[in-house]
Amino acid sequence: MGTLMEDVIDWGGEIFGREHMETIKACVQCGKCTGVCPSGRITALRTRKIFQMVQQDMREEIYNSPELWFCSTCYTCYERCPKGVKTTDLIRVIRNVASKDGYMHLQHKMVSLYVIKTGHTVPVNLDVAHMREELSKNVYPIDAIAPTVQRIPGIADKAGYPELADKPEQMEQLRTIFKETGHAKFVGFNWDKMDLDVSDEEMEAAGLKKKA
Amino acid sequence: MGEYLGTYAYFLGCITPNRYPGIEAATKKIFKEFGVETKEMEGAACCPAPGAFGSLDLHTWLPIAARNIAIAEEMDLEIYVTCNGCYGSLQEADHLMKEHPKVKEEANRILGKIGREYKGTSKINHSIVLFHDLIGLDRIKERVKIPMDGVNVAEHYGCHFLKPSEVRGQGSSETPHQIKDLVEAVGAKAVDYKDMLMCCGAGGGVRSYDAYTSLDWTRQKIVNAMNVGADCMVHPCAFCHLQLDRGQSEIAKALGVTNMLPIIFFSQFIGLAMGFNEKEVGLDIQKTKIPDKIRDKFNSG
Ligand code: SF4
Ligand code: SF4
């Protein structure tokens, strides 16, 4: 394992190009990013400090700081940094590296869980199917279940539209991607259980109900 | 029906079809009114969210976005979206694969395993840009039946439609004009308010991480708009809509207040001005309702 900065440049470099990530070296700690940050007004996030912590290789501290996860990726600081530091993209990559090293919050693993299981972060449900039925009459024809991945076995039957059942091969394509990139392992997804490898107690501690 | 202006693949994402399908039905309807045809993208997935999913694993985010774009390429159509998150992901992935041949190569190595390929031939359009530039303000003005004069609109652009501006290419992220132009074309007045460009507070996984913080952020935005006498907020993003509409109802409940700021997706707002009532543009099924000022126009007309 190299320094945190090297990890950030390597991981993010393969997506954004290394020069994009290396802009972190140009950060002069002026604090403008912190000054314009809407999150920083109500949370402990100090954007400038995030980059300082990377520059000083404070891996443990940054992985354990809740502030890292209070950035809404609004790109205000990105637009305004006087030194051209690609701030928001760096924050996303720092979070990737933390996640990869096992510092991923359960709330965020749930985002992955839904996509791996259903193809959507927010999948369809019966209420929505009925809402869509109404809209189809009142506004414009749309199917009760949109023809996207929507891997929720049985829902088309329950909604009364068996012909709108999902095509499992679409979900298979996505799962192939998850396996190929190693993402499923990364979040602790168990293919046999088709669920995260977490206990109900851990779910409760994070304020989550087990429902997926 | 207007003259035929083209056919586009509609990338739906998650929030639009699965939480606010009124946005989907109304956008298709109003597009059709102006001669823009829509085709469905069969088997499209989550974009996946640029902030939330992108914060976890960009190396998986990219091939999933590439697969989504490939579906439209197979249809030989350009894409339109009704969510800034979808726009952010697809437009950014497209940009990165065009900028960096190696990124495209790696995405295609993975897509090869599922029999697909990203070529870079389908432009990713935000629906608001098609309304503004393809349909154009003049055609919209011609179709106004119920002018929105007297209605004060707080613009909310959201983040990923405009920023990063060097990638999005939608002009200045400090002085955006698209919503203002559209609402003024149908007779309403865009009113400036404190921190107009502030994020809705839901992005980047903040809402799932800490709902309280996220809603407190949203509350500030809504209060700022109410303080200048806005009658409603008009925006181009299904994800912001979830936060501003449903999130606002959670805030109102927690604070014990009943007064809420109506939140309206831009195509539904234009639909109202074209004389379709709230039910006919699918605004009757959301938490916040249309402003009384607009309802009165329908009742007196
Ligand atoms: S604005 Fe730019 S240079 Fe200044 S502290 Fe933030 S990232 Fe560093
Ligand atoms: S992108 Fe994140 S760190 Fe930058 S201003 Fe927005 S919330 Fe703050």
Image (cartoon, coloured by chain):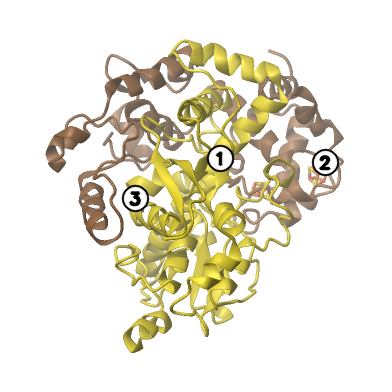
User: Ligand 1 appears in which quadrant?
Assistant: top right
The location of residue B26, given as percent across then percent down, is 38, 58
In the picture shown, does residue B25 fall above or below A65? below
Q: Splitting the image into 4 quarters, where does residue A58 fall?
A: top right
Task: Locate the N terminus of chain A by quadrant.
Answer: top right
Three-letter amino acid code of the residue under disc 2: Gly
Along the viewing direction, whichever of B185 and B164 lies nearer the viewer: B185
Return the mark for residue A84: 2
Could you tell whether A18 is left or right of B252 in the image?
Answer: right
Q: Tell me, yes or no, if residue A196 can be seen here.
A: no
- Disc 2 element: loop
Q: CA distance from mark 3 to mark 2?
A: 38 Å
Q: Is residue A93 above or below residue B81?
A: above
Q: Which chain is brown?
A: A
Front one among A149 and A31: A149
Q: Are marks 3 and 2 on the same chain?
A: no
Q: Secondary structure at mark 1?
A: loop
Which residue is identified by label 1? B51
Q: Which residue is mark 3?
A: B19
Label 3 sits on a secondary structure element that is: loop
